[in-house]
Image (cartoon, rainbow, N blue to C red):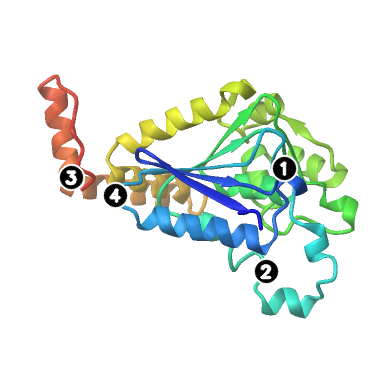
Amino acid sequence: MTQLVLTETLGRVGLIRINRPEAMNALNNDVVDGIAAAIDAFEADENIGCIVLTGNEKAFAAGADIGFMKDFDYMHAYKTDFITRNWERLKTTRKPVIAAVAGFALGGGCEMAMMCDLIFAADSAKFGQPEIRLGTLPGAGGTQRLPRAVGKAKAMDLCLTARMMDAAEAEKAGLVARVIPAEQLMEETLKAAQTIAGYSLPVVMMIKESVNRAFESSLNEGLLFERRVFHAAFTVEDQKEGMAAFVEKRKPVFKHR
């Protein structure tokens, strides 16, 4: 049997690759359980500072596996906690996750990319929420994360017409952080991931938590949270090293504590 999820450690970066090319990386429970297990392992590894999730050049993931889902009834979906049970492990990861997207990221694939902290897109990438064509709707965040990323008008357009959005439009709309030539996608994504992983891990996690807080609170509550975390950072050993290195005009040596 093909190993559906491949992992690799590259310095302080953990790489997770969806490996179901015969199905355009369609997401079933075996694939998503594999991704969740890989995240668990990288989260527990103190030597990993950033995670990259990717597919192949044709598809990040062309969607959830329709054959897997088509005979579900309500009680089965509810009792098995479908999506919540394993997909949302991406949402709870404390370390930053970059989605490196080439080819199709449609339906559940687009939703999984949006669960990550950053999306780097190859110029070949295509994003969309075409669930309406199947007589259903997005169920892993497409109606919630997409409008927060691109605004109501464009989210309505994508979800109601099922059209695809290319990488250039996705970047302009705010869904994608960077568009990169397809042949350079992994090189540039891993370079950014290594940069992030080279900084103090506690501070990286504080920044991720603080930015995410902006979407869950009022401005004043978010500012208070940021201020308290900023104050707490003065207890971090790496903060002392970072500021000392700046004053002494040298490169800091972070110990991730």
Residue at 16 percent of width and 49 percent of height:
235
Q: Determine whether, in the image, residue 178 is placed left or right of residue 141.
A: left
Residue 82 got which mark? 2
Q: Is residue 145 above or below residue 65?
A: above
Label 4 Cα crowd, 10 Å radius (few <14 / some 14-19 / many 20+): some
Q: Is residue 53 above or below residue 89?
A: above
Quadrant of the rendered image containing residue 140: bottom right
Residue identifier under label 1? 152
Sooner in the amino-acid sequence: mark 2 or mark 1? 2
Residue identifier under label 3? 234
Residue type, numbered disc 4:
Val
Residue type, numbered disc 2:
Phe
Residue identifier under label 4? 229
Residue at 73 percent of width and 51 percent of height:
26
Mark-to-mark CA distance, 3 and 2: 42 Å
Q: Determine whether, in the image, residue 134 is placed left or right of residue 240.
A: right
Label 3 Cα crowd, 10 Å radius (few <14 / some 14-19 / many 20+): few
Q: Nearer the viewer, residue 238 or 40?
A: 40
